[in-house]
Amino acid sequence: MAKKTKGKKSKKRKIIGLVCEETGRRDYYTTKGPNVTEKISLKKYNPLLRKVTTYTETKKNLGRNEAPKKK
């Protein structure tokens, strides 16, 4: 039987945080490929509100659970 090897993850993918539009908390993280230019917007469960809300993309390197300040 042939030995299975684990593949390495691509370093081109970026880690992004997802911020809730209603509360401004960052509860989820995901990765994004290099060819995607628009911001990701997903519907996810918000444990604070206990319902499904819209989460939009933000940078990962912000402080923990901080949303970018709206202008």
Image: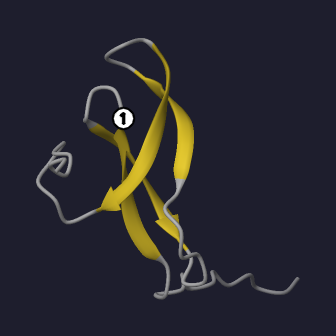
The N terminus lies in which quarter of the figure? Answer: bottom right
In this view, 43 is above or below 58: above
Report how many numbered discs are placed on residues in the image: 1
Q: Which residue is drawn at 52% across and 33% down?
A: 44
The answer to which quarter of the image holds residue 27 is top left
| Residue furthest out toward the left | 63
| Residue 56: percent from left, percent from top | 43, 48
| Residue 29: percent from left, percent from top | 40, 52
| Residue furthest out toward the right | 1
In this view, 43 is above or below 2: above
Q: Which residue is drawn at 25% across and 35% down?
A: 24
| Residue 28: percent from left, percent from top | 39, 44
Query: Foreground: 51 or 1?
Result: 51
| Residue 31: percent from left, percent from top | 49, 65
Q: Residue at x 53, y 76 (%)?
A: 37
* Left or right of 7 in this view: 45: left
